[in-house]
Amino acid sequence: MYLHDVARHTQLDRLRATTRDSRRRVLLTGATVVTMDAALGVLPVGDVLIEGDTIAAVGANLGVEDAIVIDVRGAVLTPGFVDTHRHAWQAQLRRIMPDVDDLGAYVTTTLMGYAPVYRPHDMYVGTRLAALTAIDSGITTMLDFSHNSRTAAHSDEAVRALLDTGIRGIHAAMAPHFGDWDRQWPADLARLVKEHDSRLVTFRLATLATGEIGGPDLAYGPRLAAMARDLGVGVSVDAVFGPASSHAILEWERQGLLGPDVTLIHATGLTDDAWRAIGDTGTTIALAPTSEAQIGLESAIPAVDEALAAGVRPGLSIDVEVALASDMFTQMRALHAIQRMRAVNAVYGTGTEPRRISTGDVLDFATLQGARTNGLGDLTGSLTVGKQADLLVIGAQDINTMPLNDAVGSVVLGADARNIDTVIIAGQVRKWAGRLLDVDLAALRDEVAASRDHILHAHSTIGTTR
């Protein structure tokens, strides 16, 4: 882990020289290995062998020959984090409205105001920035809920951004809520799947729970469910909260439209009957802990207790960077703190023992359950033999993580993006020695600023001509 810079450069050179070799073997050795595999647990000192893009072995003292050996003593190995829902196109507008305090203000400012002036190039810039930031902070899989698909070119550029970064991306396509667009959605999703589906980038249908915000054409129902089934893709349903969504969920259950291939996002303020339907059908849930609490979505309480009571282990997500943090560490800590506060407060003064979630729970939500929620549970989310080699090397001897006493606790409560030493996605190194690879930060900075300036200027011009 702490080899001289020259030695690390030599290792990286070897890795890059063999990047196209499907038989290449890489042995990460000597770390504490947090597998998130129930059969393997945590290995105090262990090795992970990668062959091509796949995890070939996990254990202690593997002693593999003919492998590029990387000494990761003093580190923790974990699966990459999985973001189950992010509106990536907005990234160049990060924290432009940090104190937004209701959904209506977000919708009016972002979806009604900024979104209509986006060019295809702006979709590319925002999505690429979001994906690179995700990789930098240890997110190896990101579902991009791309709800500004004004033209086919807008969608193509969003997908190209995912491909260019090397992230394991899921492009979930949805039409815009407001403004002019080509009316190519949802039919255009078939073209996207045909032209762009790849080893790393896959697709889902994105939709809303009801027509309250964007109109009935964007609401999930039999027509959109049938299209998703015909294409063989899953469905991600956003803005699931409150009585209207609860009613919709029961109607979807009656129509046979729920199941493991459907993800409901947020799920705050739902009725007991709605949760019963979710649990009975195996429907998945994506929480966005900081979004629900900070923006105040319906009850403003991340619905982890309700999900667990229904037998659903949720995934976690970032949601909107216009107001929120970009990383999974923040989501894990926010959920951990909020749930435990809620649990203790609920029984305060009664003598009843509160039901608290653990750091192991939230790490499970951020990895294995996130992968399952995105329909990729068989591919990623744990360090399991046969799964894709999506993993992190997290420094455990840094100033904020030393000494290593509990690996899971250190990852969830101690580490942050600066401790992500190495990120590997499908066997390929995307971050090495704390640095993103193949990214010209100066050029990226200029491109992001130029895109942001165009959006703000175009938006202000529209505002003065209305």
Image: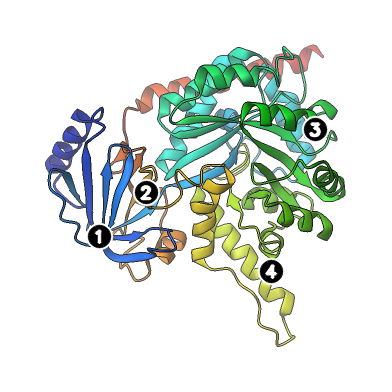
Judge depth for marks 2 and 4 and give the one in front: 4
Instruction: Using the numbered discs, state the Cα–Cα distance from disc 1 to disc 2 in whole angstroms.
Output: 15 Å
Of the image marks 2 and 3, the number of the one nearer the N terminus: 3
Q: What element carries label 2?
A: helix
Image quarter of residue 58: bottom left
Q: State if disc 4 and disc 2 touch (CB < 8 Å).
A: no
Of the image marks 1 and 3, the number of the one nearer the N terminus: 1
Residue ID for mark 2: 418
Instruction: Using the numbered discs, state the Cα–Cα distance from disc 3 to disc 4 in whole angstroms.
Output: 37 Å
Residue ID for mark 1: 74
Query: Where 376 sits versus 398, above or below?
Result: above
Query: Where 384 sits versus 170, above or below?
Result: below
Image coordinates for residue 207, horizontal then vertical, percent: 72, 33
Q: Residues within 10 Å of mark 3 (few under 14, many from 20)?
A: few
Residue ID for mark 3: 222
Image coordinates for residue 55, horizontal then vertical, percent: 32, 46
Image quarter of residue 258: top right
Residue ID for mark 4: 342
Q: How crowded is mark 2: few (under 14 residues within 10 Å), some or many (20 or more)?
A: some
Residue 317 seen in this snapshot: no
Image point 71% across, 42% down: which residue? 100
**Of 11 and 292, which appears nearest the observer?**
11
